[in-house]
Image (tube, helix red, strand yellow):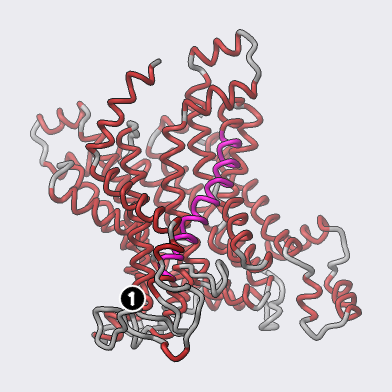
């Protein structure tokens, strides 16, 4: 019922928020590109043509009109690879956040709601996790589990739940003493019901913001791991991997490195703006 | 304060134990260390002999305690690849990472705090917008890519700085700037939001009303209160910087700890990886503990409530 009053105002605030609208539309666009990649890509991103290697993009002389953004060191169409790269970035981003969100939110809810010993134990796990150098641990885990998309998502999901845990713990702590939760406890509602049907929906605004910012974080981390050769494996078109492949030709064809990096910037910037905008309209304090 | 200090130190100690157990466990989670030492040409009997010689057939707890005992005496074991004590290798590489992390952290702080203060004085103003733009882009740009682009532009096209290595101090310029740029946004934002909050309070208005100079109000009265979250965040960011320097060191071909860890991973040289993970974690624990203690010292409420 309260929703009916809040909704229109929230929508209006959302439409007026520049960061939210600009970031959001770019994210929607990128998701569409990723989903429709087979329709949009002019070529197969994997098919090589060694006779047509390193063709320059359209703004450099000697370009080929069928390859708008040129070809890479194996003669693969760069535009098609960039388009398919959006799938990897977004797929890993959302995949990891599903895993890490599940872990982090469960831990945070239990710690914040029950307090006491559970809180002490879980807070300790969070502190320990925070003190591990994340890039290095992720690299080590991927190195030994074997680099693949599934490993990458699992490893990052198991490592990056800290922000979810911290936020949901704080939210559960502040909700715990509210009257409606006390009332539910008084009428003997089950703990599981209180946790997942009452507490969780009441903190979704905060969690959606964390989720968005975490997606951006994961996309950057995936790119870094793939760049270091311990993330997504060749020939999969990951933007991070493309940056590292372009590095060999960086002296004469710096655009090979520049383009996937620019794509990363745009996507991460858009996701961050979306997250900041969501935080602004849902009344988050930090800016 | 003493009770708070002891409590905080006890937690830090527990975290150290957990972290050391984790980095020790890494050795066994990822495969059989005896097989790794025997190498590709080693037979099953070699591996068995190594297992016995190195004591890998003893119970995990015994091995862990033995390892911790050695680590406490500064002995991280032998590197499989270099066949040298890990401690020596780490000692040779540590200065590069320490300089890189320390200087970029200082640079980030020196830019972030004044920028945050200036931005907070007129929220929504031109400076504020520019500062936010700088922060938003800093958070979106992948640092390793920015590093590569910087090498092309400043090293190759203009020849202003060396393109790789750190034989001279000029070699540090680009990596330091790139790392600092990735660490600056969070610190700038937290200074800004802290200052906005504090500048709106009554005691700042009365400080201004009694005619104190602006800088004295800001530095003497406002910053002191706005700085608490910054202290915690700064410790976190320094940890992030040390971790992030893995990628930056590989881009700029700097022989630091991060590059050492990455190369050791590719060579399956686990004792080195273990040592670096443990050292970085311990640095982080020390930093966050120090930050908490500084905050408790700055703000009596923190130690009082607990």
- In the picture, measured across the screen, residue B139 lies left or right of residue A151, that is left
Residue closest to the far front: A39
Magenta run includes residue A12? no
Q: Position of residue B293 (x, y in %)?
A: 47, 43
Percent position of residue A106, x then y: 60, 36
Going by the image, does A128 lie left or right of A17?
Answer: right
The furthest residue to the bottom = A51
Report the span colored magenta.
A81-108
Nearer to the camera, B168 or B267: B267
> How many numbered marks appear?
1
Residue at 54% across / 39% down in the picture? A165
In the displayed structure, does residue A242 sit left or right of residue B51?
left
Q: Is residue B144 visible?
A: no
Please tell me whether mark 1 sits on a helix, a strand or a loop: loop
Q: Quadrant of the C terminus of chain A?
A: top left
Residue at screen point 36% across, 51% down? A27
- What residue is pinned by disc 1? A69
- Compared to residue A227, the image places residue B241 above or below, namely above
What is the chain identity of the residue bearing mark 1?
A
Residue drawn where x is 54% and y is 51% of the image: A95
* Left or right of B161 on screen, residue B76: right
The image shows residue A121, relative to residue B129, as above or below, that is: above
User: Where is B260 relative to A217, above or below?
Assistant: below
Judged by its main secondary structure, the magenta piece is: helix
């Amino acid at each position: 019922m309260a929703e009916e009053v809040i909704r229109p105002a929230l929508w209006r605030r959302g439409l007026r928020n520049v960061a939210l609208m600009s970031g959001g539309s770019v994210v929607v666009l990128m998701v569409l590109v990723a989903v429709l990649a087979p329709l949009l890509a002019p070529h197969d991103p994997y098919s090589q043509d060694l006779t047509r290697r390193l063709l320059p993009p359209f703004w450099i002389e000697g370009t080929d009109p069928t390859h708008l953004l040129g070809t890479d060191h194996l003669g693969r169409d760069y535009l098609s690879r960039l388009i398919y790269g959006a799938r990897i970035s977004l797929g890993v981003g959302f995949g990891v956040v599903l895993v890490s969100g599940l872990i982090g939110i469960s831990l945070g809810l239990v710690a914040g709601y029950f307090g006491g010993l559970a809180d002490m134990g879980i807070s300790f796990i969070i502190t320990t996790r925070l003190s591990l150098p994340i890039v290095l641990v992720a690299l080590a885990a991927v190195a030994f589990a074997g680099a693949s998309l599934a490993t990458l998502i699992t490893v990052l999901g198991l490592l990056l739940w800290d922000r979810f845990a911290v936020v949901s713990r704080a939210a559960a702590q502040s909700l715990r003493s509210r009257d409606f939760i006390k009332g539910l406890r008084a009428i003997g509602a089950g703990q599981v019901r209180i946790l997942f049907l009452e507490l969780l929906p009441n903190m979704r605004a905060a969690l959606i913001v964390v989720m968005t910012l975490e997606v951006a974080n994961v996309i950057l981390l995936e790119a870094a791991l793939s760049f270091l050769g311990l993330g997504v494996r060749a020939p999969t078109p990951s933007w991070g991997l493309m940056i590292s492949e372009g590095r060999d030709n960086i002296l004469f064809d710096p655009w090979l490195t520049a383009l996937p990096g620019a794509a990363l910037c745009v996507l991460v910037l858009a996701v961050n703006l979306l997250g900041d905008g969501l935080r602004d309209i849902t009344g988050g304090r930090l800016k | 304060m003493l009770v708070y200090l002891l409590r905080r130190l006890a937690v830090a100690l527990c975290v150290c134990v957990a972290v050391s157990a984790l980095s020790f466990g890494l050795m066994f989670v990822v495969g059989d260390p005896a097989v790794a030492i025997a190498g590709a040409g080693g037979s099953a009997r070699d591996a068995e002999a190594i297992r016995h010689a190195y004591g890998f057939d003893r119970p995990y707890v015994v091995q862990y305690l033995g390892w911790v005992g050695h680590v406490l005496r500064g002995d991280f074991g032998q590197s499989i690849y270099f066949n040298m004590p890990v401690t020596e290798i780490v000692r040779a590489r540590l200065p590069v990472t320490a300089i890189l992390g320390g200087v970029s952290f200082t640079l980030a702080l020196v830019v972030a705090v004044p920028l945050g203060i200036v931005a907070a004085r007129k929220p929504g103003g031109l400076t504020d917008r520019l500062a936010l733009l700088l922060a938003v882009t800093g958070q979106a740009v992948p640092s390793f890519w920015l590093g590569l682009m910087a090498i092309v532009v400043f090293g190759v096209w203009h020849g202003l700085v060396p393109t790789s290595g750190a034989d001279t101090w000029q070699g540090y310029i680009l990596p330091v700037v790139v790392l600092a740029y990735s660490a600056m946004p969070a610190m700038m934002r937290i200074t800004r939001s802290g200052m906005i909050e504090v500048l709106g309070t009554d005691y700042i208005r009365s400080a201004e009303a009694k005619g104190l100079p602006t800088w004295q109000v800001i530095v003497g009265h406002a910053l002191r209160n706005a700085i608490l979250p910054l202290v915690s965040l700064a410790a976190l960011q320094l940890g992030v910087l040390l971790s992030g320097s893995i990628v930056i060191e590989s881009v700029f071909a700097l022989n630091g700890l991060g590059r050492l860890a990455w190369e050791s991973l590719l060579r399956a040289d686990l004792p080195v990886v273990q040592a670096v993970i443990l050292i970085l974690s311990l640095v982080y624990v020390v930093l966050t503990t120090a930050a908490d203690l500084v905050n408790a010292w700055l703000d009596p409420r923190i130690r009082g409530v607990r």
